Amino acid sequence: MELTGSQILMTILKEEGVDTIFGFPGGAVIDLYDEIMRAEIRHILVRHEQGAVHAADGYARVSGKVGVCLVTSGPGATNTVTGIATAYMDSIPMVVITGQVPTQLIGNDAFQEVDIVGITRPCTKHNYLVSRVEDLAKCLKEAFHIARSGRPGPVLVDIPKNVAQARTEYQPVGKVSIKSYNPTYTPNPKQLQKAVALLKTARRPVIFTGGGVILSKASPELTTLARRLRIPVTASLMGLGAFPGSDPLWLGMLGMHGTYRANMAISNCDLLIAVGVRFDDRVTGKTEMFASQAKIVHIDIDPTTIRKNIPVTVPVVGDCKISLTALNQMVQEDNLEQSMPPHGEWLAQIKQWRDEYKLAYQQKDVIKPQYVVEKLHELTNGEAIVATEVGQNQMWAAQYYHFDRPQQWITSGGLGTMGFGLPAAIGAQVAFPEKLVVDVAGDGSIQMNIQEMATAVQYGLPVKIVILNNRCLGMVRQWQQLFYDKRYSQTIMDHAPDFVKLAEAYGATGLRATRPDEVQAVLAKGLATPGPVIMEFIVESEECVYPMVPAGRPITDMLLV
Amino acid sequence: MSPEKHTLTMLVDNEPGVLSRVVGLFSGRGFNIDSLCVAETMDPKVSRVTIVTQANKPLLEQIEKQLRKLINVVKLRDMSDDRAVRREMALICVHARSENRDEILRLVNLFRAKVIDVASNYYTIEASGDEDKMTALIGLLRPMGIKKIARTGTVALYREPKRGI
Ligand SMILES: Cc1ncc(C[n+]2csc(CCOP(=O)(O)OP(=O)(O)O)c2C)c(N)n1
Ligand SMILES: [Mg+2]
């Protein structure tokens, strides 16, 4: 059958099970957009291409599907870069389709020409410039395959206008196989045996989970392992929800703003089982001191993460779910819960750490941001999908919204992209129209992609935005407050728009709480109001996120309140 | 652990942009490149890239893993030890005055090099060999006055087994 490039794109999208894409049109993609009108694919028109990528990202994080966006060449393409880098750092499966100037103009500084393949090479898992329509189907199929397999990530496909217009005999590609790309899913059983052997002598074990557990949907297996052997669990920011936050074995988050007991447990454990993590510096602090008494088992699908930052005793390259399933089986066969040395003392020690220092704040006459998040948790029964912006708001959401299940928590961990939360929440809401989706925001970050309010209103996506308005770029101000003698250089932002009026201007609902006794009512009303709602909370401006480990210090060097 | 020289060779897809993926990986991650050679193999769809880098053991492990992770890298081998042969080549334009012409020709013979161009005052020498040999030759020619020099990076191949030899 003879098809145009545009028709091939639609055919492959359908084949890959894509029912929704996020995008923004332009000259170089006008043919693709012409075809979309006829295809049975829902297109969400964002207001800025960065919003499209974050929305596709949020969609992918909660649904586990590949997020797809479509943008034009030049500025459309460059506007996606932050979003792509965000997805890359957090290993989110995504396909970004960019238009390109016609092949005969490439290299001529043509109107709206930019070398997007060159620009995104270091922040994509892979990318393609499709120079012949005959290659289009194969490139697109490979793009989806690469995006979702192994350690997932964003793949960009750059399609010149004349390639979209050209016709070719379309032949289905069938199953993709790439000679040089074969991720290792099944771990080497010998390595797992070594892990079991270490468990047999461990007296102070800890499990540490990251985004990989969420991505490979390994929460049930992880929970089984931890509960069967009664091993306490901590997580990176990306791993929250992999293990229930309400379980007594839960230690809280680890690292720079981790809990006292999690940081103490890591620093004193004798065995660390790290699953789907990459030992980011925000987690490890000073690497030489990180888990320095422990033997480390590191399970990850990406061999480059192993021994990159931290030396490990037992490397296990494999998919988290498959690896944990195999490990659980060995544990069961060995009847390890009987043969493991008892570690009641260790659990008692952890309990003591828990009692020594708990996450805490005092709600007096000004609204505390932590209080807002805690109330949000209470009023939503801990069941909302929570997206965040970046900064203090993000850390308080991580600390006080005790996530019980995976794919409930959407945050830009690796890149820390302000402006991520609102479009990501929109993407999550598109994936799950019936679920409650909340964006916990800062007054600074929300202004970075506030234009997406129009998208939310247009498509009737009832995202609820909780702005913790501290009138400043709080997290940077916190560093200045603690380490730069309160020299608040360019972090005080007392010229924000009136967020209530702004919500109304977009056709949404705006609510505001200025006193602690208004918090509950505003949250309750906002959550019950149909359609998108901005709830603004005027919070304490000099509040800090505690505990805090100053960058580069051992994680036991915690500043506590 | 002090860094050592390593010769890494890889087979890569012979497609536009692939070299820039390899080189971009080195610059982006702060790995070092001492030299770099690229050319097509017998299979026109595949190129061979040879990179000499300096790294200690953990860093080398990381470089190799990162390279293998590139979708276009088909195969990668460390060719730093005796199981491989390594060669580089240089064109050396040296000042050839009457009093040292004989000495230059003697060195050319000794190093099994060739004079490939003769000008009124200069010889251009083509030499190849492993890194030590090249360094030695250049060292010996230097006092006579090297006007210009063009050196390639290292290329390497694994030795085939020597059964019955
Ligand atoms: C795009 C981007 N620019 C700058 C930063 C640096 N940064 C990190 S947190 C932060 C402050 C964010 O302010 P706000 O959104 O009000 O959140 P708060 O910390 O006050 O809760 C800044 C500027 C960033 N992470 N992302
Ligand atoms: Mg703020």
Image (tube, rainbow, N blue to C red):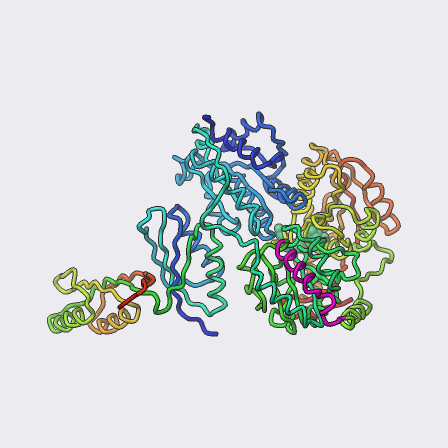
The reply to whether residue A497 is visible in this rendering is yes
In the image, residue A49 sits, relative to residue B69, either above or below, namely above
Q: Nearer the viewer, residue A224 or B3?
A: A224
In the image, residue A153 sits, relative to residue A462, either above or below, namely below
Which residue, as the protein is rendered here, is positioned at the far right? A517
Q: Residue at x 53, y 34 (%)?
A: A12
Residue A387, position as x, y percentages in the image? 71, 47
Q: Residue at x 62, y 35 (%)?
A: A20
In the image, residue A133 sits, relative to residue A560, either above or below, namely above
Residue A217, position as x, y percentages in the image? 66, 50
Q: Nearer the viewer, residue A499 or A439?
A: A439
Q: Residue at x 44, y 50 (%)?
A: B72
What's the magenta bit mostly, secondary-structure-wise?
helix
Q: How many marks?
A: 0
Residue A149 part of the magenta segment: no
Residue A550, position as x, y percentages in the image? 67, 67
In the image, residue B8 sits, relative to residue A128, either above or below, namely below
Residue A332 part of the magenta segment: yes
Q: Which residues are magenta?
A: A322-343
Q: Residue at x 38, y 54 (%)?
A: B11
Quadrant for the C terminus of chain A, please: bottom right
Which residue, as the protein is rendered here, is positioned at the far left? B98
Q: Is residue A138 left or right of residue A154?
A: left
Q: Nearer the viewer, residue A201 or B23?
A: A201
Residue A520, position as x, y percentages in the image? 86, 47
The reply to whether residue A487 is visible in this rendering is no
